[in-house]
Image (tube, rainbow, N blue to C red):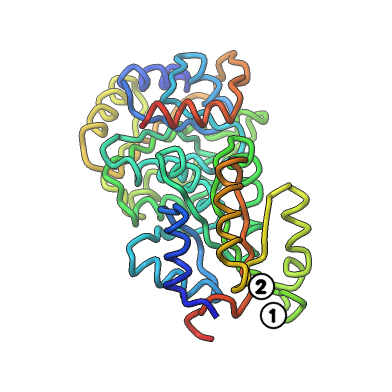
Amino acid sequence: MIESDAFVQALQDVGFDFFTGVPDSILGGIIETLMERRLYTPAVREDEAVAMAAGAYMAGKVPAVLMQNSGVGTSLNAIISLNVIYKQPCLLLISWRGFQGKDAPEHLVMGENMTQVLDSVKIPHRTLSEQTLVDDLRWTAQTFMKERVPVALLLKKGIVKSLHP
Amino acid sequence: MQSRARVIAALIEQLTDQPVIICNGFPSREAHKIADRATHFYMIGSMGAAAAIGLGVALNKPDKKVVVLDGDGNVLMSMGTLATVAALKPKNFVHVVLDNEVYGTTGNQPTISNVVRLEQVARAAGYVNVERVIEREDVVYEFKDMLKKDGPSMLLVKVTEQCEDAGRVMIEPADMTQRFKKAIE
């Protein structure tokens, strides 16, 4: 399992310098590290977070938004009618709740359709693994620069250390 | 009470190189018709997001006063952002709400801002300076004052339902992003 400290450092190393979002348990360790490093600006909804990221990008930052996959539903309109069409890139670091049907009922529908939802609105995405982390982050940074659109990294339980394993 | 376009014109007259985020619908169209500047960011979709975009700019450009020209429908849609702004307390954030009590772009269906006083919500959340104004001289006086003071500030201006004959903003969205980004560097 990747330590949250190493994961955050890897994100910073590829250039990310503005972090916002809405918490999830899978993201708990990452958010704690970001807060320790005074890099995290909390949002109250995911659509607010992606809009803050848009503003941060235009102010010269390289933004990342953390959210549970339920937040993809909440923020989808903002993502496609702001970040996508205005070409305001950000990393969407999305925790994949409901993966393979193993989660609470409220997570199952989005969990089952996670990649299809992103594919249907043409958001490039990868699913993080410990083995491919370096390559995944390099791909993220390249896609970010080249296509200038939101890029999603899906994070399943047990890849990066959370607060309560 | 004045039309929204008259108020926007009076506000823009007070500005020079400050970043301005303008909400979707007629406010953006009217502002674009009155004066198109590279420091203007016109929203065309993502209703409710104006204040959050402005917040993202303000937090990362602390030396620039960031102005958000918002509407009552937009603020009601993302009322949580009033709390986020108030909690983060950016000193350089001036939130103008042009309150006509209707969804003007879709046919004047009523909002609920005739009942809910949005400036009081902002005050309760923790905005530092809050004013509710109607007359032109008050709009100009309070806006100039908020440009000088530490915020976050909200200036709620009651306006009529009248819409200016202003077409869609035809700037390519991606071009607008780069133009705005460069202008506020």
Chain to which the residue tagged by mark 1 belongs: A
Earlier-in-chain disc, 2 versus 1: 2
Amino acid type, residue under disc 2 in the picture: Arg
Residue A30 rendering spot, x and y as whole percentages: 46, 70
Mark carried by residue B134? none
Instruction: Return the residue at label 1.
Output: A104
**Is residue B1 shown above or below A131?**
above
Residue at the bottom extreme, as displayed? A165
Residue at the (42%, 65%) spot, across then down? A9
Q: Is residue B60 left or right of residue B176?
A: left
State if disc 1 and disc 2 touch (CB < 8 Å).
Answer: yes
Q: Is residue A92 left or right of residue B7?
A: right
Residue B88 rendering spot, x and y as whole percentages: 33, 54
Please identify the quadrant where the C terminus of chain B is shown: top left
Chain to which the residue tagged by mark 2 belongs: A
Residue B102 rendering spot, x and y as whole percentages: 57, 34
Label 1 crowd bin: few (<14), some (14–19), many (20+), radius 10 Å: few
Picture quarter containing residue A80?
Answer: top right
Residue at the (51%, 63%) spot, across then down? A22
Residue at the (50%, 24%) spot, across then down? B160
Instruction: Return the residue at label 2.
Output: A97
Can residue B1 be seen here? The reply is no
- Look at the numbered disc 1 and give the secondary structure of its residue: loop
**Along the viewing direction, whichever of B56 and B88 lies nearer the viewer:** B56
